[in-house]
């Protein structure tokens, strides 16, 4: 009897987990297909002049708003040999998904070429907690992403 109860609880939690993941995927798809966002861009100058953050190839932040509600943030960071693009997705002010892609922009000989995808990470959140990620990562990276989603939201508010 106890085994049946444990199996029942595990199956319910697995079903709920899958439903959360599918719901988040649908929300991200809706956010990505909407075309009439009010877009606020924060240029590299802000990061250099206000935050004293300098990178080899600059950085940019863009916030996508629908009816004054933040739906998506895209942060691009250019280093000497790589570019990282991180997309943060929100539902009702809550972080629900993060997609991070790292590209190699200079090869081992120092030549410029078409950017080459080096890694891609996907993080799914429900109620502020990580519920799944495709690429296994450590808790420090998750904390870093959550903190930066808040920092970037604040940067969007501050920048005029």
Image (cartoon, rainbow, N blue to C red):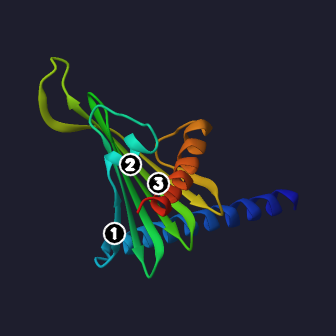
Callout 3–callout 2 Cβ contact below 8 Å: no
Q: Quadrant of residue 77?
A: top left
Considering the image in quadrants, where does the C terminus appear? bottom left
Specify whether 9 is left or right of 2. Answer: left
According to the image, label 1 marks what residue?
A: 39
Distance between mark 1 and mark 3 Cα atoms = 19 Å
CB within 8 Å, label 1 to label 2: no
Instruction: From this view, report whether residue 142 is shown above or below residue 73.
Output: above
Calculate the distance from the C-alpha at mark 1 to the C-alpha at mark 2: 16 Å
- Circle nearer the N terminus (3, 2): 2
Residue at the disc numbered 3: 98
Q: Which mark is residue 47?
A: none
- Tag 2 residue: 46
Q: Residue 42 location, x and y as percent? A: 36, 56
Quadrant assignment for the N terminus: bottom right
Foreground residue, 151 or 1? 151
Mark 2, other Cα within 10 Å: few <14 / some 14–19 / many ≥20: some
Compared with 137, 123 (above or below) is below
Q: Nearer the viewer, mark 1 or mark 2?
A: 2
Image quarter of residue 107: top left
Q: Residue at x 53, y 38 (%)?
A: 137
How many marks on residues? 3
Residue 3 on image: x %, y % = 82, 56
Look at 52% across and 39% down and name the residue there: 136
Locate residue 140 relative to residue 64 in the image: left or right. Answer: right
């Amino acid at each position: 009897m106890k085994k049946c109860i444990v199996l029942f609880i595990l199956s319910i939690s697995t079903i709920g987990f899958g439903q959360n993941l599918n719901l988040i995927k649908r929300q991200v798809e809706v956010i990505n297909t909407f075309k009439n966002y009010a877009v606020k861009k924060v240029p590299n100058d802000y990061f250099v002049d206000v935050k004293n953050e300098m990178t080899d190839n600059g950085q940019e932040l863009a916030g996508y708003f629908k009816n004054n509600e933040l739906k998506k943030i895209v942060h691009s960071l250019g280093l000497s040999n790589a570019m990282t693009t991180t997309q943060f997705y929100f539902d009702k002010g809550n972080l629900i998904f993060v997609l991070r892609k790292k590209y190699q922009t200079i090869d081992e000989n120092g030549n410029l070429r078409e950017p080459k995808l080096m890694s891609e990470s996907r993080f799914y959140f429900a109620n502020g907690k990580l519920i799944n990620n495709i690429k296994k990562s450590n808790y420090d990276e998750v904390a870093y992403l959550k903190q930066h989603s808040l920092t970037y939201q604040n940067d969007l508010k501050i920048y005029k």
